[in-house]
């Protein structure tokens, strides 16, 4: 059975604004379940006009998504897959990984904040210029038993359903979460005290509300909160 690679990912990713909303919701959900070390984070105005979404699972796998006025640049790193740059020394990207990256987004692989020891550790790269109708990737090729990590790194973003996050939380945080509350956050509904309590009964609503606003997520205004 052939493993899903970046060529499937570019057909599965939602449009940029939907993707941005999913990234923001993931960051808020993770902040509720693990405020000290969230797996997913989101930085509105990381740089002027640029939002940044990050994932780091603490086991060497990660991704970054830059939402730039010129478009979106996404890269992921699965440290155990066939496409790891560490398969050779000096490190080298999988052939074709960045071929075709448009000039408007070509500075991101060279960004020091995306690099480890002056190199972009990436096994997956995807981009979409402003006004482009679809996502794009380089002309990478894989055999049936080779992978680049696209089959699992971005499943919470490509699926975007409450059930997928509930399963992730059960596995990763080892705790059940309320599906209805997850769906409420994913829909972008302004955050309420009831939603916070449903997801994390001991959480301080004022602190969570502050974090939500920092993420650019709306909070329901009320005399109580």
Image: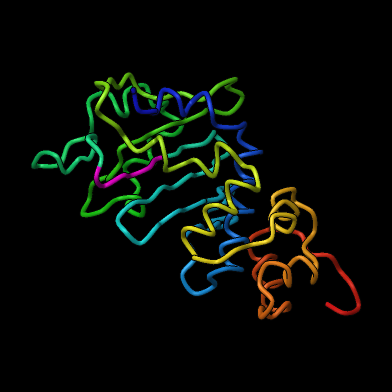
Q: x, y percentage for residue 15?
A: 62, 31
**Residue 183 among magenta residues:** no
In the image, what residue occupies the spot 38% across and 39% down? 107
Task: Name the foreground residue: 28 vs 107.
Answer: 28
Q: x, y percentage for residue 53?
A: 51, 51
Q: Is residue 167 left or right of residue 113?
A: right
In the image, what residue occupies the spot 8% across and 42% down? 89
Q: Is residue 147 left or right of residue 159?
A: left
Q: x, y percentage for residue 161?
A: 64, 43
Q: x, y percentage for residue 169?
A: 54, 59
Magenta region: 75-80
The image's colouring method is: rainbow
Vertical relation: 73 (above or below) 207: above
Numbered circles on residues, count: 0
Image quarter (top left, top right, bottom left or bottom right) of the C terminus:
bottom right
In the image, what residue occupies the spot 56% across and 50% down? 51
Q: Quadrant of residue 98?
A: top left
Image quarter (top left, top right, bottom left or bottom right) of the N terminus:
top left
The outermost residue toward the right is 223
The outermost residue toward the left is 89
Vertical relation: 103 (above or below) 36: above
Task: Name the foreground residue: 31 vs 171.
Answer: 171
Task: Name the foreground residue: 187 vs 163.
Answer: 163
In the image, what residue occupies the spot 33% across and 44% down? 77
Q: Quadrant of residue 75?
A: top left
């Amino acid at each position: 059975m052939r493993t899903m690679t970046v060529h499937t990912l570019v057909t599965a990713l939602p449009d940029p604004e939907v993707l941005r909303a999913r990234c923001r919701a993931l960051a808020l959900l993770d902040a509720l379940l693990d405020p000290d070390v969230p797996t997913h984070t989101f930085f509105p105005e990381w740089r002027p006009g640029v939002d940044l979404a990050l994932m780091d699972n603490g086991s060497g796998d990660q991704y970054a998504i830059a939402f730039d006025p010129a478009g979106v640049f996404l890269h992921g790193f699965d440290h155990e897959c066939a496409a790891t740059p560490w398969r050779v020394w000096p490190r080298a990207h999988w052939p074709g990984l960045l071929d075709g990256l448009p000039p408007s987004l070509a500075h991101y692989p060279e960004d020091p904040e995306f690099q480890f020891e002056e190199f972009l550790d990436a096994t997956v790269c995807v981009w979409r210029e402003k006004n482009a109708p679809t996502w794009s990737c380089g002309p990478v090729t894989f055999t049936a038993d080779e992978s680049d990590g696209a089959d699992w790194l971005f499943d919470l973003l490509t699926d975007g359903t409450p059930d997928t996050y509930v399963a992730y939380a059960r596995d990763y945080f080892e705790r059940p979460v309320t599906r209805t509350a997850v769906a409420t956050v994913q829909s972008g509904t302004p955050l309420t005290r009831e939603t916070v309590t449903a997801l994390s009964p001991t959480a301080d609503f004022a602190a969570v509300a502050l974090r939500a606003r920092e993420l650019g997520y709306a909070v329901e205004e009320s005399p109580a909160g």
